[in-house]
Amino acid sequence: TETFATALIDRVHGRSSGVGMGQQKRQMSEYEKEEQELRKLQQKNKQTKLIGAPSESEPVRKKPKSSVITLKGDVDEDRDQEEMKELDARLKEKHKEEQNQKGQHTVINTQLNKMTEDELLEVLPKIKKESRYEYLKHREEQQLDLLRRKIEMRKQMFAGLKLSKEEEKLEELEETLLSLALERRKGRNLEGG
């Protein structure tokens, strides 16, 4: 066990010892053999010519694409280009909105910096309330959209299938909830909100 431990320590520290060198040479020779075999195979492959394959001096002829594939490819490319334009327009619009919001925030921040401490104590609750109101409007939109998509997805998944009474009742409740929430929002908008 002592010779094993010293051989192991020597390997870790990179020292050469007579015990492991024979194995290392054998492994290297196996690796070299594999390399030589691979080189021989590559040379054979280069020398072998496929029957009917054009030689390097002959030009390769390309088959013309059929009109159906070309038309379909053109349609796909046109659709892709349209989608890219739409995506680009949406991203530009989103960027403009973000820049407007940043501009509004910087104006508010400069105004807040100019105020005294008493004025700030007066204005901050109002700003917090407005901020909370904006967040709740945004959150309400998200939740309504989520509920709407959930109902649509459930209808698509279970179209043509017979639902149990509990499932029908759940679906009806969700649809009622969505319609009531939309009516409530319309009423709030008409009142002045």
Image: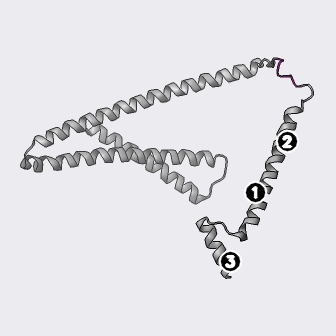
Q: Which residues are magenta?
A: 53-58
Q: Decide which of 159, 15 is in the foreground and name it.
A: 15
Asked which secondary structure carries label 3, the reply is helix
| Main secondary structure type of the part rendered in magenta | loop
Residue 63 drawn in magenta: no
The reply to whether callout 1 and callout 2 are in contact (CB within 8 Å) is: no
Q: Position of residue 71 (x, y in %)?
A: 70, 19
Residue occupying image coordinates x 19% and y 41%: 109
Asked which secondary structure carries label 1, the reply is helix
| Mark 2 to mark 3 CA distance (whole Å) | 41 Å
Residue under label 2:
41
Location of the N terminus (image quadrant): bottom right
Which mark, by number, is residue 28?
1
Location of the C terminus (image quadrant): top left
Q: Residues within 10 Å of mark 2 (few under 14, many from 20)?
A: few
Q: Position of residue 73 (x, y in %)?
A: 68, 23
Q: Decide which of 38, 192 is in the foreground and name it.
A: 38
Q: Amino acid at mark 3?
A: Phe
Residue occupying image coordinates x 93% and y 28%: 51
Residue under label 3:
4
Q: Position of residue 61 (x, y in %)?
A: 81, 18
Q: Nearer the viewer, mark 1 or mark 2?
A: 1
Residue occupying image coordinates x 44% and y 30%: 90
The reply to whether callout 3 and callout 1 are in contact (CB within 8 Å) is: no
Q: Amino acid at mark 2?
A: Leu
